[in-house]
Amino acid sequence: MELVLISLASLLAGGIDSIVGGGGLILVPALFAVYPTTAPATLFGTNKSASVWGTSIATVQYSRRVQMRWAVLLPAAGAALAGSFIGAWVVTLIDPTFLRRLLPFILLAVLLYTLAKKDLGRTHAPRHTQARETALACAIGAVIGWYDGFFGPGTGSFFIFLFVRLLGYDFLNASASAKLLNVATNLAAIALFAMKGHVWWKIGLVMAVANVAGSLIGTRLALKHGAGFVRGVFIVVVGALILKTGYDAFLR
């Protein structure tokens, strides 16, 4: 019964994650509810071991239908991988608690900006030369990758928002691009958790199958309905993140 519940949560998380990220909002609380006595690091590691497959499949699906800017994104993914390793190392030295109270306000600013700019992310119009775009994408990858390794919540949403705001992508292309960078940061996290024995590989495999199925559904919805649909889901997910992180920071 436990595996059934976790698989259903992983299915739904895969669908949400493939569109705008934020699948951890569903899967991580589900893991904590089903396995309340397990070490948090093991649950986080197992979550990553499953979600990376859904994110990888989503990246492949998007790349078949969206013009991925590989010359820009591959260096950015490398920067995200390095940033995530560094962030995970830093968290062993510094307590990330200070971010807990700051995060809801950062997310609120992202949400309000997106709502105020009605046309934000509706048109795909990269605005920089390739060299400048690559440099900016690498900076985004390194900074948000570091954040993912150090703290984590809202990583996918930050990637998407910055690709839209700074690079001129629409929400569909930004989401597709964010998936590749998310794969990189997830691989860094899995490597670190695995080295410390914090991954349940068998349970992770079952979750991965469900996560991939959800990812295929979510990707098809995003490709079918386009940037406007992705923008709408982005607004809903960021709103949910604000509520979740606000509760964790001030009421828990």
Image: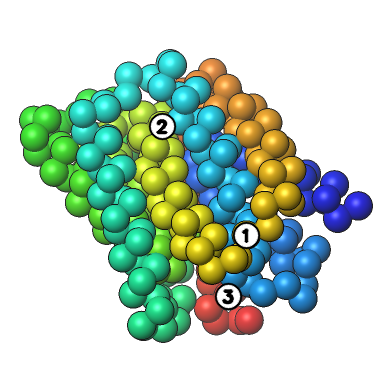
Q: Which residue is mark 1?
A: 199
**Is residue 68 rendered to the left or right of residue 133?**
right
* Mark drawn on residue 45: none
Residues packed near mark 1 inside 10 Å, few (<14), some (14 to 19) or many (20 plus): many
Secondary structure type for disc 3 = helix
Q: In this view of the protein, which residue sits in the foreground, 90 or 242?
A: 90
Q: Which residue is mark 3?
A: 248
Where is residue 177, by image quadrant? top left
Amino acid at circle 1: Val
Residue 69, horizontal then vertical, whole percent: 26, 26
Dot placed on the residue nearer the N-terminal end, 3 or 2: 2
The residue drawn where x is 11% and y is 30% is: 130
Q: Nearer the viewer, mark 3 or mark 2?
A: 2
Secondary structure type for disc 1 = loop
Amino acid at circle 3: Asp
Dot placed on the residue nearer the N-terminal end, 1 or 2: 2
Proximity of marks 3 and 2: CB atoms separated by less than 8 Å: no
Label 1 vs label 3: CA separation?
A: 25 Å
Residues packed near mark 3 inside 10 Å, few (<14), some (14 to 19) or many (20 plus): few
Residue 246, horizontal then vertical, whole percent: 53, 72
Q: Nearer the viewer, mark 1 or mark 3?
A: 1
Residues packed near mark 2 inside 10 Å, few (<14), some (14 to 19) or many (20 plus): many
Residue 142, horizontal then vertical, whole percent: 26, 55
Q: Which residue is mark 2?
A: 176
Eyeballing the image, is 74 above or below 26?
above
Q: How is the image coloured?
A: rainbow
Amino acid at circle 2: Ala
